[in-house]
């Protein structure tokens, strides 16, 4: 295997390159690729932001978060229901 074929094998797809080029998402993706424990920090930050949003705006923040997770849960249920 030459250097050119290994470089092509590790090159991300077009959506992956687009996601890595975004200003906020790109550094997070690269950090998670380097160290998987960063995923837990990201989870804690998201949970803290949700708690602060609920504390600030109350029930509408909780409802909008639940509505936002409906497609995610739908995909999870479809994956689990596959034979």
Image (cartoon, helix red, strand yellow):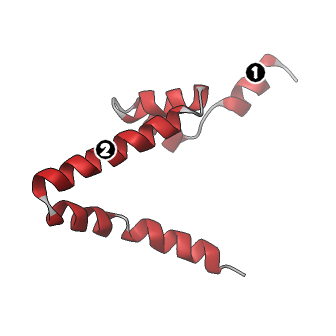
- Tell me the quarter of the picture where residue 66 sits: bottom left
Say which residue appears at 40% left-offset and 41% top-offset.
Answer: 44
The quadrant holding residue 22 is: top left
Count numbered badges in the picture.
Answer: 2
Q: How far from the left and from the top, in percent, is residue 32?
A: 54, 32
Residue 48 is tagged as: 2
Mark pair 1, 2: CA separation = 44 Å
Q: Which residue is mark 1?
A: 4
Indicate whether 74 appears above or below 62: below
Write the residue at 64% across / 31% down: 11
**48 shown above or below 29:** below
The N terminus lies in quadrant: top right
| Picture quadrant where residue 61 is located | bottom left
Which residue shows up at 59% across the image and 31% down it? 33
As drawn, the label of residue 56 is: none
Q: Nearer the viewer, residue 37 or 17?
A: 37
């Amino acid at each position: 295997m030459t250097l050119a074929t290994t470089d092509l094998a590790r090159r991300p797809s077009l959506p992956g390159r687009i996601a890595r080029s975004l200003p906020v998402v790109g550094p997070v993706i690269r950090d998670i690729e380097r160290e998987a424990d960063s995923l837990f920090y990201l989870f804690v930050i998201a949970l803290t932001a949700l708690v602060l949003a609920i504390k600030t705006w109350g029930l509408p923040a909780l409802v909008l978060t639940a509505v936002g997770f409906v497609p995610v849960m739908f995909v999870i249920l479809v994956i689990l229901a596959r034979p």
